[in-house]
Amino acid sequence: MRLHAILAFGLLLLDTGPVLADVNSPVGSWKNISDKTKKVEAVIQIWEENGELHGKLTKLFESKETNCTACKGDKQNKPLLGLEIIWGVRKNGDEWTGGEILDPSSGDIYSVKMRLAEQGQQLKVRGFLGISLFGRTQTWLRDQ
């Protein structure tokens, strides 16, 4: 009987462990909310690799495009689903900075910084050119 209780408690910890860890990190799935239309545009999966955050599109809502026709270089005409749009972002205090983000609708690449808000349920994503003052921020919602 005692072994069953220990196993059940262990399974409970395994089940809730990733949720607790994700609250302190952008790693996970996020719904991209347009700062213009206020509608969900996409789901972005963020992962960590060699100390850097990366993100790719995993779901699109109401998109007429299936390929990144506006992209340049090695991303030109690549399928939007699975396209890496965030790379090179590193933790810097309570923010993640130093990387870049691709806007697939324009093909433009911006510097990016991110910070968690609302107990890790929101991600404030700011894309900018040059200094952070010249940019725009979107609020992404954690995709449960």
Image: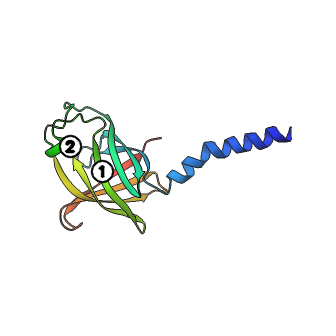
Which of 107 and 141 lies nearest the eye of the viewer? 107
User: Label 1: how many residues lie within 10 Å, few (<14), some (14-19) or many (20+)?
Assistant: many
Tell me residue 106's x, y (percent).
Answer: 15, 45
The answer to whether residue 73 is seen in the rendering is: yes
Q: Residue furthest right?
A: 1
The image shows residue 21 at horizontal and vertical percentages of 54, 53
Q: Earlier in the sequence, mark 1 or mark 2?
A: 1
Say which of 144 and 1 sits in front. 1
x 35%, y 56%: residue: 124
**Up-down relation of residue 48 to residue 31 (above or below):** below
Measure how far apart labels 1 and 2 are at the Cα level: 11 Å
Q: Position of residue 126 (x, y in %)?
A: 28, 58
Q: Is residue 17 left or right of residue 85?
A: right
Q: Secondary structure at mark 1?
A: strand
The answer to whether one can see residue 106 in this image is: no
Q: Residue furthest front?
A: 50
Q: Is residue 29 left or right of residue 3?
A: left
Q: Secondary structure at mark 2?
A: loop
Is residue 92 rendered to the left or right of residue 37?
right
Circle 2 Cα neighbour tier, 10 Å, few/some/many (<14 / 14–19 / ≥20): many
Amino acid type of the residue tagged 1 in the rendering? Ile
Q: Quadrant of residue 14?
A: top right
Q: Nearer the viewer, mark 1 or mark 2?
A: 1
- Dot 1 corresponds to which residue? 86
Q: Which of 87/65 is in front?
A: 87
For the residue pair 40 and 30, the one nearer the viewer reads as 30
For disc 2, the marked residue is: 104
